Amino acid sequence: MAGLALGVRRSILFAGLSLALVVVAVISAASGQLAVPPAEVLGSILHAMGLDIGPAPSDANAEAALWLIRFPRIALAVLVGAALAAAGMLMQAIFGNPLAEPGVVGVSSGAALGGAATIVFGWTFFGSWTIAVAAFVTGLAATALVYAMSRANGKTEVVTLVLTGIAVNAVTSAGLALLMFIGDTQAREEIVFWQLGSLNGAMWADVAVVLPVVIVGVLVSILLARRLDLLSLGERSARHLGLNVEALRIGTIVLVALLVGAAVAFTGIIAFVGLVIPHLMRMIIGPAHLPLLIASTLGGALLLLTADLVARTAVPFADLPIGMLTSLVGGPFFFWLLRRTRARSGGWA
Amino acid sequence: MRRAGLFGRRGAGAPDAGTPRRASGAAAGDLAGDAHGAPSRAAHGPRFGGTADITSGKGPRGGPGSQGAGSIDVDGVSVTIDGTGILHDVSLQAHPGMLLALVGPNGAGKSTLLTVIAGDQAVDSGTVRVAGHPLASWSIKQLARERSVLLQQTSVAFPFTVTQVVEMGRAPWIGTPFEADDEAAVAEALDLTDLHSLTERHVPSLSGGERARAALARVLAQRTRILLLDEPTAALDIGHQEDVLRIARAQADLGDTVVVVLHDLGLAAAFADRVCLLENGRVVADGTPTEVFDAELLSAVYRHPLEVLTHPVNGTLLILPVRSARGPSSEENP
């Protein structure tokens, strides 16, 4: 515990993440096939806010590129990253296990199943919210299923959790395969891209759906944070301290499904954000859930925004699937974490 | 001054040396006063007098703050788990100021009985009353302000520090006037359990004994009238075993009700006011250590010849297995 006091470390981390988020957002808006100088990006935002400060974009198409394509994409990346990281942290808290993550245990693919079904069958019960609602419903079912199947005697052992994830992922993959088989060519193409995960084609309408869900989800999580701390003592001890464990568990599962459903509905499966970010943040500021939630939300937003910048600009004229990028980094990280957890607990417990 | 004796294992100045990280100057001063001088009962808020103010409003019928506070009344309780009868018609009472030891062989139902009193295990028949009110009438939160529980196995899922874990013991008091006691309660609990040098260590990285003490500190920080301890000495060396039982004894002397599951009959004899001996889910003896610890009865219950001796100096009972192979047999001893 050498170095700075915890409170100072937290403050530095929050400030650093927030600053980095703003900087990367501006860089991301400035980058692309049509380069817009960062000063003009800021100018454009300030002008839109009614402040006549800074240079307006000089290129005729820049204004449209920023407001119709890049800004909604950036907004969606920030929201989805925040949602996934927060969902990962919530899952780890109720499972009492740092390896629980929406992508790993099959919650994301469960949500994807509902979204894909919406595409194939052309459902429109809830207008622009249909896909998100469907993703939430199947995501909720998947979360509840994983939770019910991987708990034994009030604990979730790593091996049970991972194997449950394999089983759930197998079933949802079968469901997605069936939907691709049923669907027409266009639906198939959409599902494939969506399985890879991408922020390509993000629209303000998507942001309008995701934004309220993420705000509500994160705010409720903040209210639950201190109770999640107690859960780390185990269910019985938490109850002895006056915690209604059942209610917290159900509430948290719904929250996870809500956040993952909203994220998956518009970007597809982006795995490992919920694993890597809370873990890194826990290493820096410790496991207390309130600061961890704030740090994870900021960190997840930063990670996904950065990953999307790379996905868009790494290869000229190509938009790499972002889910591929996060899995490329997250897969080995997961493996390292698994080995470390195993070494620490002296087995697969 | 009784509690000052608890610090025997540390230097006399220990409570001051390990200044609590979070305590303000005033709180640290209170603590030191509490530790060195006569314990100030008023400082224990939740247990005494003032408690009724907050709990009676919310408590079941008249509130746990009323008469009967701190009492435990188990009446004719039977429990069956997965078709196996674990407890049969068990009755026992405990009241403030008492340290009740539950003893008996493995599988006798001691831990299950404690689980029943804690409100975690439903009973098939019989009633359990805490502070005069049936368990069913307590809300989870109210119960957490009346009794604390130390489980046999405690683990912490994430690398929380010792201080953070002990602070969790204050959770039931969030939003009550007793929230103001948080710092003092945490510092006192760390003090009693000799944990001041480990406050910033991560609990999962501690040794088994240190973890057990951290869990005990969390329970003490909860500051409830009733303490339920399930084998609190299991992972501890003999010195810390003594410390834990002395802490439990001191809490009882301060007016708490302490129920502790023990395997070590010598510890039970030395520290308990009352001993309840269980065998196969039934109470076979219930009384003072002198009444219960009868060599013939214990030998029958433990299915092993045991002898009960009286310590030549202080008069406490020593319960030992009869060993013939290497030492002299009991007949040869006067």
Image (cartoon, rainbow, N blue to C red):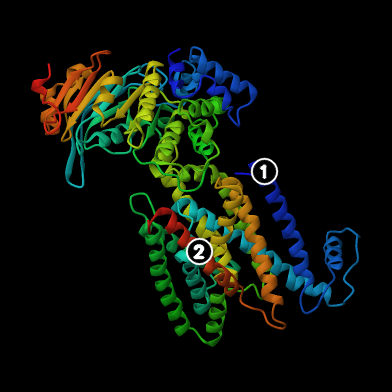
Q: Residue furthest bottom?
A: A185
Q: Is residue B295 above or below residue A332?
A: above
Could you say whether the residue bearing mark 1 is in a helix, strand or loop?
Answer: loop
Q: Circle 1 sits on which residue?
A: A4
Rendered image: mark on residue A336: 2
In x, y percent, where is residue B132? 33, 22
Q: Crowding at label 2, few (<14), some or many (≥20) Cα neighbours within 10 Å? A: few
The residue drawn where x is 40% and y is 73% is: A170
Taking the spot 43% from the left edge, 17% from the top edge, the residue there is: B5
Q: Is residue B44 left or right of residue A202?
A: left
SS class of the residue under badge 2? Answer: helix
- Where is residue A337? Give x, y as percent: 50, 61
Whether marks 1 and 2 lie on the same chain: yes
Query: In the figure, residue B317 lies in which quadrant?
Result: top left
Q: Is residue A222 above or below residue B329?
A: below
> What residue do we see at 43% from left, 80% from top?
A178
> Of callouts 1 and 2, which one flags the residue occurring earlier in the amino acid sequence?
1
Does the image show residue A130? Answer: no
Residue at mark 2: chain: A
The image's mark for residue B180 is none
- Cα gap from disc 1 to disc 2, whole angstroms: 27 Å
Amino acid beneath label 2? Trp
Q: Where in the figure is residue B73, as x and y percent of width and height?
A: 28, 24
The number of numbered discs placed on residues in the rendered structure image is: 2
The quarter in which the C terminus of chain B is drawn is: top left
Quarter-wise, where is residue A301 in the image? Answer: bottom right
In the rendered view, does B119 fall on the left or right side of A13?
Answer: left
Label 1 marks a residue whose chain is A
Image x and y of residue B196, in percent: 52, 31
- Which amino acid type is shown beneath numbered disc 1? Leu
Q: Is residue A147 visible in this depiction of the protein?
A: yes
